Image (cartoon, rainbow, N blue to C red):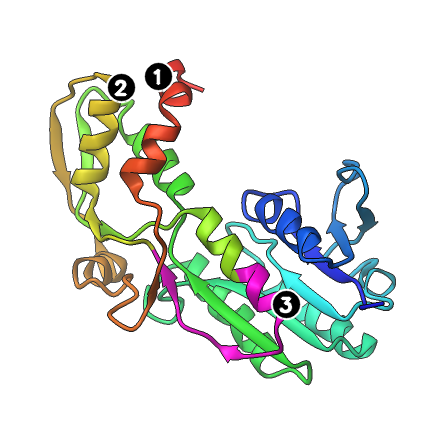
Amino acid sequence: MNAPVLVTGGTGTLGSLVVPLLRGAGHEVRLLTRGSRPAPEGLAHVRADLRTGEGIDPALEGVGTVLHLAGGPKGDDVATRNLVAAAERAGVGHLLLISVVAADRVPLGYFRAKLGAERAVQESAVPWTVLRAAQFHDLALTAVRALAKAPLVPVPGLRWESVDARDVAERLAALASGGPAGRVADLAGPEVLPMADLLRTYLEARGVRRPTVPLRIPGAAGRAYRAGENLAGPDADRGTRTWAAFLAEHLGAVSSGR
């Protein structure tokens, strides 16, 4: 029997899509969570705190592959270092990390933490794979929904190539079933869209009219976004599900304000 696959962040937006794919491919899956929320039926559930390291060693006992999907606005580098150290002690054979496109190019704390997480994995003794993905359509929806609440809608001067989380989940499941591959090609959405277009299609979907005003992002981050440093570039792989298709699927949630 194959060794279990441990998934951190297995109940999140991405994890909840990856886990069924892993199970469908015949993997035994174990979820690592920090809270006490019960795991979905048929799944082993272990509790550990990646930020402090508490409980990680027993969670990794007998594990062959780790999919590190857990993340947050800060602290990903610290959590990943703790996970990597435990994976080394446990003799894990493959550690697969999800990171973000342009982790080394956008001067914001979230990107720096992701880059630190990548380095922790790459410098470890555990065989590894790192996949950088663009921001999800889900995040784009959250962003435009928040911006559109203003009577005068601010439009940040940046472009996004958001990707459907299902496309990312499918790539991760395939990578988990293979061997360690190092840094693989970035995965981004099928199109690059200015934030103005993301907002326009959202407002049209809601049947709402709002005046807009350009918003200049200040500082080094603004310069990076205006230069397109956040974009994956021509060598990236591309998902197939567009922003418009994603938005159409979510029209009910959008129109009801949920």
Secondary structure at badge 2 equals helix
Q: Amino acid at mark 2?
A: Arg
**Residue 79, position as x, y percentages in the image:** 65, 62
- Find out whether residue 163 is within the magenta segment: no
Residue at screen point 79% across, 63% down? 4
Residue at screen point 83% across, 49% down? 44
User: Badge 1 is on which residue?
Assistant: 255
From the viewer's side, name the closer residue of 69 and 211: 69
CB atoms of marks 2 and 1 within 8 Å: yes
Would you identify the image quadrant in which residue 151 lies?
Answer: top left
State the CA–CA distance, disc 2 to disc 1.
Answer: 6 Å
Mark 3, residues whose alpha carbon is within 10 Å: few (<14), some, or many (≥20)?
some
From the viewer's side, name the closer residue of 241 and 117: 241
Would you identify the image quadrant in which residue 94 lies?
Answer: bottom right
Q: Which residues are magenta?
A: 172-188
State the CA–CA distance, disc 3 to disc 1.
Answer: 39 Å
User: Badge 2 is on which residue?
Assistant: 206
Q: Is residue 51 visible?
A: no
Which sits earlier in the primary sequence, circle 3 or circle 1? Answer: 3
- Find out whether residue 186 is within the magenta segment: yes
Q: Amino acid at mark 1?
A: Ser
Q: Is residue 53 left or right of residue 110?
A: right
Secondary structure at badge 3 equals helix
Mark 3 against mark 2, which lies toward the viewer? 3
Q: Residue furthest front?
A: 25
User: Badge 3 is on which residue?
Assistant: 177
Give the quadrant of the N terminus: bottom right
**Residue 139, position as x, y percentages in the image:** 40, 41
Residue at screen point 75% across, 41% down? 35
